[in-house]
Image: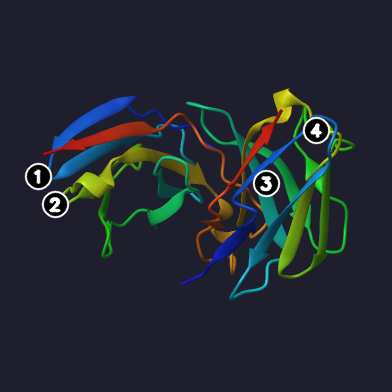
Amino acid sequence: GAVVSQHPSRVICKSGTSVKIECRSLDFQATTMFWYRQFPKKSLMLMATSNEGSKATYEQGVEKDKFLINHASLTLSTLTVTSAHPEDSSFYICSARPRSNQPQHFGDGTRLSIL
Amino acid sequence: DAKTTQPPSMDCAEGRAANLPCNHSTISGNEYVYWYRQIHSQGPQYIIHGLKNNETNEMASLIITEDRKSSTLILPHATLRDTAVYYCIVSSSANQAGTALIFGKGTTLSVSS
């Protein structure tokens, strides 16, 4: 079945550091990928839609200069949290779908902790 | 996309069927019903989806009412590993690869022995 892989699964870093999270579609190509954020005991919140070869589309309230998204190939999207602060600590999850008539598949998430 | 309403929590005994309801009274004709679940500290896992007919796969069954305003996810023999948050999502994304799924609060299913 379709597999979406995220790396790293967990990262702990100091405040002010920039952190890059990778999302890969392992056995299919994805022109579109999605990035979500989830705070403890809350549901997933859509942050942005990543489009291969073009700019990402951000949801209202998400700072595009803070959460940089790059989708340079059909199998890889990256989310970079720039100058991370403790309030950016969260569970970040990506998703993609193989084809329009198939469901979306999610990565296992990246737990980001900013000290 | 239409909104969904789910009970915040449900309990189920191991080995029994778990029936998780979902109301989606504003669903439109081209919107599918998707079910995902999320086990603690993992990404959501796809379970099943349907348009208007009942669906069954190796994980679960999906029963959609004739008017499509509600549905029920059935886990026929719940196990402890089925303890998770279950999300019912309505979306027209079946035919649009670029449409994200929007998550509600879901139902926390607790399976106990």
- Residue drawn at (80%, 63%) of the image: A52
Q: At 51% from the left edge and 31% from the top edge, which residue is drawn?
A: A43
At horizontal 67% and vertical 46% (from top left) the residue drawn is A35
Residue placed most toward the observer, A29 or B21: A29
Residues under labels 1 and 2: Cα distance?
5 Å
Which residue in the protein does label 3 denote?
A35
Q: Quadrant of residue B68?
A: top left
Q: Helix, strand or loop at disc 2? A: loop
Which type of secondary structure does the marked residue at label 1 adopt? loop
Same chain under badges 3 and 4? The reply is yes
Q: Which mark is residue B16?
A: 1
Name the residue type under label 3.
Trp
Element carrying mark 3? strand
How many badges with numbers are in the image? Answer: 4
Judging depth in this view, the residue of A70 and B89 nearest the camera is A70
Does A14 appear above or below A108? above
Q: Nearer the viewer, residue B98 or A41?
A: A41
